[in-house]
Image: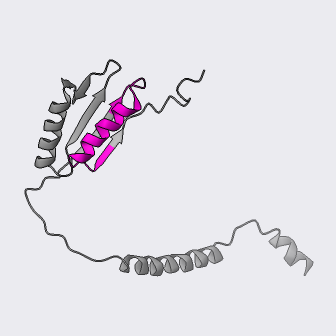
Amino acid sequence: MASATRKRGIIAEINVTPLVDIMLVLLIIFMLTANLIAKQAIEVELPRASQSTSLNPTTLAITLTRDGTLYLNGTPTTPAGLREAVSAAVSKDPKTQAIISGDKSVSHGRVVWVLDVVKSLGVASFAIQIDPTAMTAPGSP
């Protein structure tokens, strides 16, 4: 008996059969649950068209400079010109967006006035452009 155990020695091989069994069970469980998750979505077959376009909403860039100049899409304008351009853009595209950029020295009331004009003319989506690198409060050292 002693000679039979000496020939065998230490088992230095990995038995992969239990590992494969566990992986197959996990695979089956994953396949079943993935099927149930996919069934919760509403299945719709969308029609195809040879001519299609994606419509991006019109975006207006409004800028207030330090000296009080008002710019619309990079060109100087007046408050009346701003009102005309915004109402024309909204009449063409009801989903018109506005991005308002104001110098930090411009009064809060002036920026609120621009926001009020834009909102009163039908622009529902707007943003105020900021400098994300400036993390300190204005006027602090």
Where is residue 124? Give x, y as percent.
Answer: 27, 50
In this view of the protein, which residue sits in the foreground, 43 or 117? 117
Measured as percent of width and height from the top left, residue 38 is found at: 38, 76
Task: Decide which of 28, 121 is in the foreground and name it.
Answer: 121
Quadrant of the frame with the N terminus: bottom right
Span shown in magenta: 101-126
Residue depicted at x 87% and y 71%:
6
> Residue 120's spot in the image, x, y percent?
24, 47
Across and down, in percent, residue 13 comes to 71, 67
- Quarter of the image with the C terminus is top right
Image-quadrant location for residue 115:
top left
Compared with 89, 55 (above or below) is below
Colour convention of the picture: one colour
Q: Would residue 84 be counted in the magenta stretch?
A: no
Horizontal side of 98 relative to 4 (left or right) equals left
Q: Inspect the magenta stretch and tell me whether residue 103 lies in it.
A: yes
Q: Residue at x 26, y 32 (%)?
A: 62
Image position of 132 (left or right of 69): right
Compare residues 132 and 63 and report the one nearer the observer: 63
